[in-house]
Image (tube, coloured by chain):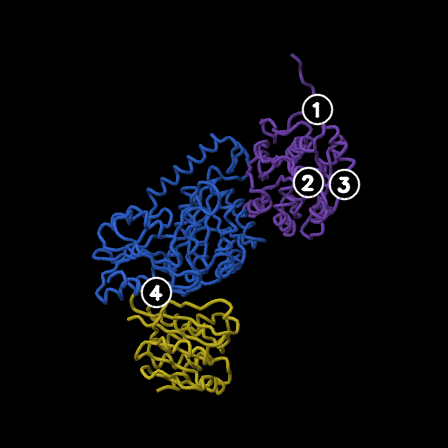
Amino acid sequence: MIKSIIIAGFGGQGVMLMGKIIAESAMLDGLNVTWLPSYGPEMRGGTANCTVIVGDEPIGSPVVDVPDVVIAMNIPSMIKFEEMIKKDGIMILNSSVIDREPSRKDIKVYKIDANKIADTIGNPRVLNMVTLGAFAKVTGLVKLEMIGKALEETFAGKNKKLIDLNLEAVRHGMNSVS
Amino acid sequence: MKMLMKGTEAIAEAAIRAGCRLYFGYPITPQSELTEYMAKRMPEVNGVFLQSESEVATVNMLYGAACTGKRVMTSTSSPGFSLMQEGISYMAGAELPAVFINVMRGGPGLGDIQPSQSDYFQATKGGGHGDYRMIVLAPHTLQEAANIMGEAFDLAFKYRMLVTILVDGMIGQMMEPVELPEWKNIEEFKEPDWALTGAKDRKPRKVTSFDLDPYELEKMNLRYQATYKKVTENEVRYEEFKIADADIIVVAYGTMARIVKTVVDSARKEGIKVGLFRPITLWPFPYERLSEIAGNVKHILTVEMSYGQMLEDVKLGVNGKTDVEFYGRSAGVVPTPMEVLEAIKKIAR
Amino acid sequence: MATVDKIVAQMPKSLSKIEFSYCPGCHHGIVHRLIAEVIDELGIAGRTLMVAPVGCSVFAYNFFDLDGTVAAHGRAPAVATGMKRALPDRIVFTYQGDGDLASIGTAEIVHAANRGENITTIFINNAVYGMTGGQMAPTTLLGQKTTTSPYGREPKANGYPIRMSEMLSTLDGAAYIERTMVTTPQNVIKTKAAIKKAFQAQIKGLGFSMVEVLSTCPTNWGMTPIEAMKWLEENMTKTFPLGVFVDRTKGMI
């Protein structure tokens, strides 16, 4: 099994971190992973994206042209990556920002009101973790327990409240999809 | 224990574990994280980090530090590697060991900052003046990159040569789980008998790339050539991936070879017998092995993130035994698995 | 057989037995000897590394009985930096000419000085490129004829003679910078004292030190050695005044 995920959005929406947590959680679960960022000026304010691949066999190409899953956090990302998604693949949309319908009918679409959910938790910045929770739930590729560990790794040295907050956001995200 | 690391960081940490305590560098995208990692890490291991005023200065600082017989390194990206060529030529002539990391980006000129493999000629054929070579290693995963650092320093000292790790921006920027190599004990490194350390209780030593007498300079050159011959005889490294029954063999290195591995599998699912031949040492290039396997296949396809640089070495190796095709994109555009598959299908038809 | 009561002068131990290759009347030889005497007197020969330049003094690494190398043109301060960072308890000095230090190697010398790199530079300024055959140097005087300024150096085309000691003395990393010449016994003694101070500054870890020695090049100036000395004193010192430009060694050595 090898699954590829493209995560895209505005700089500042935390898409790179979301990808890193997915990769780290999968690694902690014993899977092979790669995380490949788009890098350069687009990191500063434009549209950023990263490609995460997880699998139980060695991963060759870190580059994909037909992703299994796309997480689009804004309209430009949806437009850019929707066409690439594998038939019967998954697209997760941040519906707080994306107010239009995708055109593909042969993929599964999940809409997450990520900004709003983040606001209800009390910190708008955790919208990426809300989305990550939804991703974990609908794909089953990463487990909550491993996400918790990955968050501890990533925020090592920071205060525990931050980890708890992020984990709570993940749980909310998981609960937001069925 | 495996850690999820960025390529630049894995390479830097592996170099420190391999006994490097002297790093000189100048920021340039897409490898500045390596420089930053060294800035933070070197003081923790009683090492030296120095940000130079230019890549021209960097390579000369490396020259000076290498003169003392210690493990020294720098990292840069294409335009910076160009600026270092003068010093590289001097270091090669002075037979100084050192390790260079070139995280290649699109060129020529200022180019862009996206992944590329267009510095192959510069690294393998000599970007500076004079008859010299440097050992060029091309890892294709972060684990291999981390593992190869120790070997790079060992080779540099074994042969008194420069070693370049040639990777592209993708290896530099991507993250992957890495099991870091064991620590080498720097106390156990012997001081080489040519090192400049001050001539206390011994005859003074001189390290230069210089002799105005052509016959003396020729002797020096013949010594370099003898070393290069030994390296070509003993240090060729490559990987063969599913080539036993292959009709088509793709030759690719670095990240491009990773992409091809995926393509090999998808092509086989479609009934095309494809294999990958991956040079790990770009210099010395595995001509002989390539020549052997070329006789058994219908086609050779070279795939590069350039417009055909390694292609010339592949042709030298294949030496007319079969036809050699090429697919490549450069300037920071990375060929996707589907594009490479199309190129294979075109040949298979 | 005559017996020796007292040695009043002898060849410094830090000089090798290899004969200098310099032209008659050239000042490189004098300055080499002064450096060697200073190294002997300070007892640092066993822990001194030298970096020779590209130029007439390219062979300097062989004229000293010290561990040494030759840097690429202009890059000696970077090479010395690498050595010093690798072996901080050694004494490292560069020996550079005006084309090397003040033209192609300006970036390296400026930044070595600015970092307060704890090295010593001996800078030979003779206002001309010697080894390549008398071309214009960045320190060539206005109106001075060279093979690449055959009508005399003209500021509109070639700019002005660059004063490196003054320039570098503005940098906080510089510990000691002095300009001297070796045209008379008194000047030779002064130069030796300056070189000694520069090395002492390094021994004490005070930062970058440099002695600029105004020198002659009778061959490329087209003069006899005596004419050249006179020309130096009468002309060069006007553009390049002698003196100490920075001294942070007071009370330290």
Q: Residues within 10 Å of mark 4 (few under 14, many from 20)?
A: some
Whole-Å distance between the Cαs marked 2 and 1?
46 Å
Whole-Å distance between the Cαs marked 4 and 2?
61 Å
Residue closest to the far front: C151
Q: Position of residue C81 (x, y in %)?
A: 58, 47
Q: Amino acid at mark 2?
A: Ser
- Rendered hue of chain B is blue
Q: Nearer the viewer, residue B300 or C65?
A: B300
Whole-Å distance between the Cαs marked 1 and 3?
30 Å
Residue closest to the far top: C1
- Rendered hue of chain C is purple
Q: Disc 1, disc 3: CB below 8 Å? A: no
The residue that mark 2 highlights is: C149
Q: Nearer the viewer, residue B318 or A70?
A: B318
Whole-Å distance between the Cαs marked 4 and 3?
67 Å
The residue that mark 4 highlights is: A61
Q: Are marks 2 and 1 on the same chain?
A: yes
- Whether residue C251 is visible to the viewer of this picture, yes or no, is no
Q: Position of residue B319 (x, y in %)?
A: 29, 47
The residue that mark 1 highlights is: C8
Q: Earlier in the sequence, mark 3 or mark 2?
A: 2
Q: Disc 4, disc 3: CB below 8 Å? A: no
Whole-Å distance between the Cαs marked 3 and 2?
26 Å
Whole-Å distance between the Cαs marked 4 and 1?
78 Å
Q: Earlier in the sequence, mark 1 or mark 3?
A: 1
